[in-house]
Amino acid sequence: MRYQLNAEELKFEAEVEAFIKAELDPEIQRRVARSLEVAPAMRNEWTRKLNRVGWVAPNWPEEHGGTGWSMRRRHQFEVLMRKHHAPETQGFGFNMVGPAIIKYGSDSQKSYYLPKIRNAEMQWCQGYSEPGAGSDLAGISTRAEIRGDHYCINGSKIWTSGAEHADHIFLLVRTDPDAKKQLGISFLLLRMDAPGIKVEPLLAFNGKRLWNQVFFDDVMVPREDRLGDENAGWTVAKNLLGNERLMVSRVAENKRVFGRVQGLLDELGLVAEDDFKKRLNAIEIRLKSLESMALRLLSKFDQGGHVGAEPSMLKLQGSQLIQAQDQLLLEIAQYYGLPADSVLRGQSNDPIGPPETEMIASALFHHRGYTIAGGASEIQKNIIAQHVLGL
Ligand SMILES: Cc1cc2nc3c(=O)[nH]c(=O)nc-3n(C[C@H](O)[C@H](O)[C@H](O)COP(=O)(O)OP(=O)(O)OC[C@H]3O[C@@H](n4cnc5c(N)ncnc54)[C@H](O)[C@@H]3O)c2cc1C
């Protein structure tokens, strides 16, 4: 399947591009294009602009401020946003806890949380993994004991991305230690400034604070801040992504990075080098096949077909392709790609090579996480083997 736009899609493309041209601050665009850090305030400003035109939550139902778009339309929107270097909205709010609140929340939870997420007035982080529970998430041991109309939480969560900026966390806790492990878990919504929460930084290979470990020491949470039924948190967690799993292919991001590879080869006068040409072609073929597979599944869903475990193939291929592109970028840039990027170097010092090269090593290290987070590649392969190939 080739990705060709029909007349209506071309009209939509023009509308989205006109909006981006009018509203997206060129400084934000420059930062995203170069993989430089985008401050939360800048991202929030863009989120609010999207909210004003009703495009901020393409995956939410219309009655909750979503767009009601088909999957294919969402894909088109996403590709355009990444192509023009718009920052991503906060995934934990829009793609994870927001849809979970829509599905499992009480009316008061919906009316309290959803408008604040849409307008970037609330920043979330995800409290799932623990030092002893990652791929085997049902093995969590952070405890929530009932004390009157509160839970008292003790334990810790690890690899918590963005906890240093977040004002809320959604949390999986064990509420029944005697039940079968999936049956004794509840899903809570908490404020990060609750007494007894401590956030410690964890640094990634590139020296940046990518994660945190979050400690809970007798943290009291009202029982009404539970999402879904008590001991039914596993169902909430499993459904959390819902159809979102279909958007895990990273096609749009891969296309954006592909543009960078082409641009850098051009800038450094290496376009004609045989080895690079061959590798670029090989990557382009992988990218096209990834997009075809994604579009096939999105169209199947839009036509009412059942999409089972197949998105695991998108996750596996999309995350591996980003890493292959990073590797190629580093080989093209060579030593220009190695020095510390501007976040560690201090914004005032110039990079040593062309500006396009300065974040390459940093991005390569950052993207190592893509084949781990959200279910490691080995887990995706297990799912594909069992549920797609029936082995
Ligand atoms: C960039 C990044 C951001 C993250 N952000 C968050 C976050 O915000 N919140 C959060 O809660 N967590 C987050 N995580 C944690 C992530 O969810 C876990 O790292 C992931 O689930 C794997 O768990 P683990 O690290 O405990 O590895 P383990 O589960 O211990 O796995 C170790 C290795 O063993 C393999 N393995 C495990 N089980 C099997 C099996 N059954 N068959 C074959 N191989 C297996 C794995 O594939 C992996 O290679 C993040 C991780 C990364 C890398």
Image (tube, grey):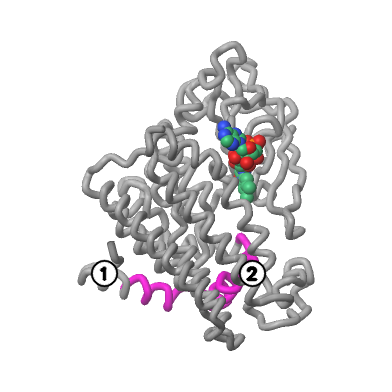
State which mark lies toward you, 2 or 1.
Answer: 1
Which residue appears at 30% of the width and 59% of the height?
73
Q: What separation in Å lies between label 2 and label 1 (alpha carbons)?
A: 32 Å
Residue density around tag 2, few if under 14, some if 14–19, many if 20 or more, within 10 Å:
some
Prevalent SS, magenta region: helix
Q: Which residue is mark 1?
A: 5
**Along the horizontal axis of the image, is 299 left or right of 361?**
left
Which residue appears at 47% of the width and 49% of the height?
315
Q: Which mark identifies residue 190? A: none
Q: Position of residue 153 (x, y in %)?
A: 67, 25
Is the CB of the residue bearing disc 1 within 8 angstroms of ligand 1?
Answer: no
Residue 192 in view = yes
Residue furthest top in the image: 178
Is the CB of the residue bearing disc 2 within 8 angstroms of ligand 1?
Answer: no
Q: Is residue 108 above or below residue 81?
A: above
Instruction: Indicate the amino acid at tag 1.
Output: Leu
SS for tag 1?
Answer: loop
Q: Picture quarter containing residue 134?
A: top right
Q: Quadrant of ligand 1?
A: top right
Q: Position of residue 181 (x, y in %)?
A: 56, 19
Query: Magenta span covers which residues?
Result: 15-40
Q: Is residue 8 above or below residue 54?
A: below
SS for tag 2?
Answer: loop
Tell how many labels. Answer: 2
Q: Is residue 390 magenta?
A: no
Residue furthest bottom in the image: 269
Residue nearest the viewer, comparing 125 with 280? 280
Q: Which residue is mark 2?
A: 36
Instruction: Indicate the amino acid at tag 2.
Output: Leu
Which residue appears at 39% of the width and 64% of the height?
288
